[in-house]
Amino acid sequence: QVRLVESGGGLVQAGGSLKLSCAASGSIFSSSAMGWFRQAPGKQRELVAGISGGGITNYEASVKGRFTIYRDNSKNTVYLQMNSLKPEDTAVYYCNSIAAATINVNWGQGTQVTVSS
């Protein structure tokens, strides 16, 4: 089982930037499709960005052009660069493999992102 540790969240003003990191244990990381998810209060967790083992990316419409997901397989780490942040981006952000997220298992503690207006 892969262990995931998210970091990099914080409080930022609207228009600011944050970079989230997700360190993963486990030898299968480099071949696993990974995603960044977020859950705002009172809302369901949603996928905001995904990256395949080969580096193909996809984004939820509201973050496209502002967020960038990338990975460093040598460090077993996936990142989320978030620019032009908006108050509606406020949420707890999680990373997970797409496979584990599909069956709702193996979630880490997440990292809180708060964007003030």
Image (cartoon, rainbow, N blue to C red):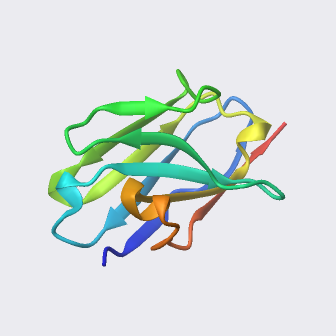
Q: In this view, does 12 lie to the left or right of 71?
A: right
- Residue 16: x and y in percent read 64, 34
Q: Which residue lies furthest to the top in this view?
A: 65
* Image mark count: 0
Rendering quarter of residue 45 = bottom right
Residue at coordinates 48% horizontally, 65% vertically from top-left? 103
x, y percent for residue 98: 40, 54
Query: Residue 18, percent across and down?
Result: 55, 43
Q: Residue at x 31, y 73 (%)?
A: 2
Residue 114 spot, x, y in % from top left: 73, 51
Nearest the viewer among 29 and 88 is 29
Looking at the image, is 11 positioned above or below residue 15? below
Q: Quadrant of the N terminus?
A: bottom left
Which of the pair 93/11 is nearer the observer? 93
Left or right, 109 with reference to 34: right
Closer to us: 39 or 77? 39
Residue at figure coordinates x 78%, y 54% from the top left: 43
Q: Residue at x 36, y 32 (%)?
A: 57
Instruction: Tell me: residue 100, above or below residue 117.
Output: below
The C terminus is located in which quarter?
A: top right
The relative height of residue 101 versus residue 58 in the rendered view (above or below) is below
Considering depth in this image, is 70 or 62 the residue closer to the camera? 62
